[in-house]
Image (cartoon, rainbow, N blue to C red):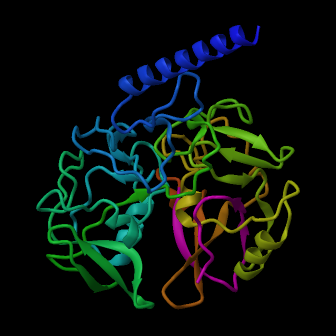
């Protein structure tokens, strides 16, 4: 009996080895090998980790890049960042560049921003004369330098810019505007990913999901006993009902930091581009939140504090989701004294930093 059991075990192990070999021979060159039934993921299923090196040959259909959002943007699978496909070549001051990204609705979505220097560098390599990966799908990446949001030696009036033609860095005063400076390349996303999440549920900032259905739509789901809303497009978790009582900026900051919504701490004021990601420019009416959304904005005014600071002064950036000056855009940014009062809408998750 033991001898028969040994033969059976040997046969089973041999079968597993054959199946593993078959899997390895059919897998792509960068796919992790594994036997049939293995929980190991293939390359396409792995979430962005900044630890992969993927081929860019093939433009919109390469291992690394994919054109998304009506081909107006490019998803970089190495980092998970979503980039404007055609950078803006109209020379701007830093503040104008920030405003341009905030007010740009590529692929029907807001939520764009200037990249950090590290994010800009992630697009550069040594495969081509212009430091842009060969075979990439980007269009008209011109000469000159591109704005980043990274300060130069902690000088709040100067930022680091990157020249893709040559790969050099340059200090540029925020007010600078000229004929060979100040290209703008907007980016979307940058939040951390949960490696244990299913690939289909990973937020990528590159999808446009329908929101009809309130708490049970493809885009939104109510979580934390219904007091919060998960946005599957961005991975951000929002208060379902923003605070109705206006308050000063510092008080709003503390309220988000210290209160437990849904039984959890870890809330914060949002970045401007995060609030903007909730706006759908195709929606008619003054408040352009996606149709069928589950939020309750019945608390009055729809102007909300963000973490963003204006220069070195005491003003902070606020976002209007409604107002006579919103026009057809449905979103307006304004710098308001921290002594004034506005509503606040706390968020959880994402890549938002603590205000400086």
Q: Which residues are magenta?
A: 331-356
Residue 22 appears in view: yes
Q: Residue at x 58, y 44 (%)?
A: 285
* Residue 233 position in % (x across, y down): 56, 43
Return the residue nearer the eye: 130 or 13: 13
Position of residue 71 relative to residue 5, above or below, is below
Whether residue 334 appears in magenta in the rendering, the answer is: yes
| 43 in magenta | no
Q: Which of the image's four quarters has the N terminus?
A: top right
Question: Which quadrant would the C terminus be assigned to in this image?
Answer: bottom right
Residue 342, horizontal then vertical, whole percent: 71, 72
Q: State the residue in front, 80 or 113.
A: 80
Q: Nearer the viewer, residue 182 or 39?
A: 39
Residue 56 location, x and y as percent? Answer: 26, 45
Residue at position x 21%, y 63% in the image: 89
Q: Is residue 52 above or below residue 214?
A: below
Which residue is at the far left? 129
Number of on-image labels: 0
At x 49%, y 18%, the residue is 19
**Left of 112 or right of it: where is 343?**
right
Check the image and report above or below for 175 versus 196. below
In the figure, residue 221 lies in which quadrant? Answer: top right
Quadrant of the rendered image containing residue 315: bottom right
- Please provide percent x and percent y for residue 158: 36, 87
Apparent side of residue 299 relative to residue 47 in the rendered image (left or right): right
Whether residue 176 is visible here, answered yes or no, is no
Residue at image x 61%, y 79%? 355
């Amino acid at each position: 009996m033991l001898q028969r059991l040994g033969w059976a075990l040997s046969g089973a192990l041999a079968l597993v080895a054959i199946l593993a070999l078959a899997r390895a021979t059919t897998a792509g060159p960068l796919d992790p090998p594994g036997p049939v039934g293995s929980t190991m993921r293939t390359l396409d299923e792995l979430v962005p980790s900044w630890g992969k090196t993927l081929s860019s040959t093939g433009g919109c259909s390469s291992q690394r890049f994919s054109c998304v959002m009506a081909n107006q943007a490019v998803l970089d699978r190495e980092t998970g960042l979503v980039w404007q496909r055609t950078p803006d070549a109209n020379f701007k001051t830093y503040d104008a560049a920030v405003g341009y990204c905030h007010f740009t609705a590529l692929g029907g979505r807001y939520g764009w921003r200037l990249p950090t220097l590290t994010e800009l560098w992630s697009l550069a390599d040594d495969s081509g004369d212009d430091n842009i990966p060969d075979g990439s799908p980007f269009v008209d990446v011109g000469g000159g330098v591109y704005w980043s949001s990274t300060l130069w030696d902690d000088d709040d009036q100067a930022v680091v810019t990157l020249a893709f033609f040559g790969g050099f860095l340059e200090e540029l005063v925020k007010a600078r505007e000229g004929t060979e400076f100040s290209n703008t390349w907007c980016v979307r996303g940058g939040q951390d990913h949960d490696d244990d999440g299913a690939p289909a549920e990973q937020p990528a900032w590159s999808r446009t999901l329908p929101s009809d259905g309130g708490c049970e739509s493809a885009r939104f789901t109510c979580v934390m006993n219904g007091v919060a809303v998960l946005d599957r497009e961005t991975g951000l978790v929002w208060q379902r009902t923003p605070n109705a009582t206006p308050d000063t900026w510092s008080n709003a900051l503390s309220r988000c930091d210290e209160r437990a919504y849904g039984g959890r701490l870890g809330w914060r004021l949002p970045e401007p581009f995060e609030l903007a990601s909730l706006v759908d420019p195709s929606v008619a009416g003054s408040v352009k939140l996606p149709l069928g959304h589950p939020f309750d904005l019945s608390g009055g005014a729809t102007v909300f504090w963000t973490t963003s600071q204006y220069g070195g002064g005491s003003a902070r950036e606020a976002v209007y989701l409604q107002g006579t000056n919103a026009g057809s855009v449905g979103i307006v940014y304004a710098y308001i004294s921290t002594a004034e009062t506005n509503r606040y809408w706390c968020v959880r998750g994402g890549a938002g930093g603590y205000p400086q």
